[in-house]
Image (tube, grey):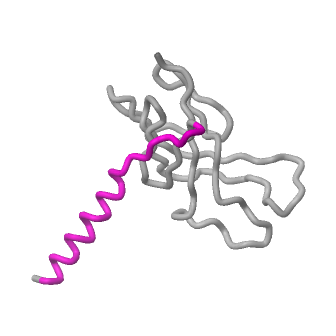
Amino acid sequence: MKRKTVFSLALFATALMGCTTIQPDRDGIARAGIGQTAYVGGPRVTPLAVMEDSRCPMNARCVWAGQVRLTVRIDTGSGYVTREITSNKPVPVADGSLELVEVTPNQVAGGDPIRRIDYRFGFKFSGGS
């Protein structure tokens, strides 16, 4: 009986983590990790998976800066869609545009791969009335 209660509490705590909505900072950027929801002044955005992270490592010289592609869930209040978003390429959402403007931590040449849990993404929403 005790084991079942501990498991239930752990499951409940995990579910609550996904319910947290993060508000934008003073700079207008709302940051969230995988499975967290960011409120970006209009829609709510939940990063689901990293599809590509080809950013140039911070301790390397590259011809191309690279990009990050994510699968995100976008909730506009009237429903939600799952889409792919690429860093610094705004996508139309509702009556504005959503942009992935920040990804941390930085890549490091020769370092360990970034763990899924360590990623943080910054989103900005422009437009809307």
Q: Which residues are magenta?
A: 2-27
Number of on-image labels: 0
Residue at left offset 74%, top offset 53%: 55
Q: Position of residue 87 (x, y in %)?
A: 66, 41
Task: From the viewer's perspective, tell me whether residue 64 is left or right of residue 9.
Answer: right
- When the figure is inspected, residue 2 is found, relative to residue 17, above or below; the finding is below
Toward the left, the furthest residue is 1
- Residue 17 found in image quarter: bottom left
- When the figure is inspected, residue 127 is found, relative to residue 5, above or below; the finding is above
Residue at left offset 32%, top offset 63%: 14
Q: Position of residue 92 (x, y in %)?
A: 55, 24
Q: Position of residue 36 (x, y in %)?
A: 43, 52
Toward the bottom, the furthest residue is 2
Please identify the dominant SS of the magenta region. helix
Q: Is-magenta flag for residue 20?
A: yes
| 28 vs 9, nearest the viewer | 28
Toward the top, the furthest residue is 129
Residue at left offset 39%, top offset 34%: 75
Q: Is-magenta flag for residue 67?
A: no
Q: Position of residue 127 (x, y in %)?
A: 54, 21
Query: Quarter of the image containing the N terminus?
Result: bottom left
Residue at left offset 22%, top offset 70%: 9
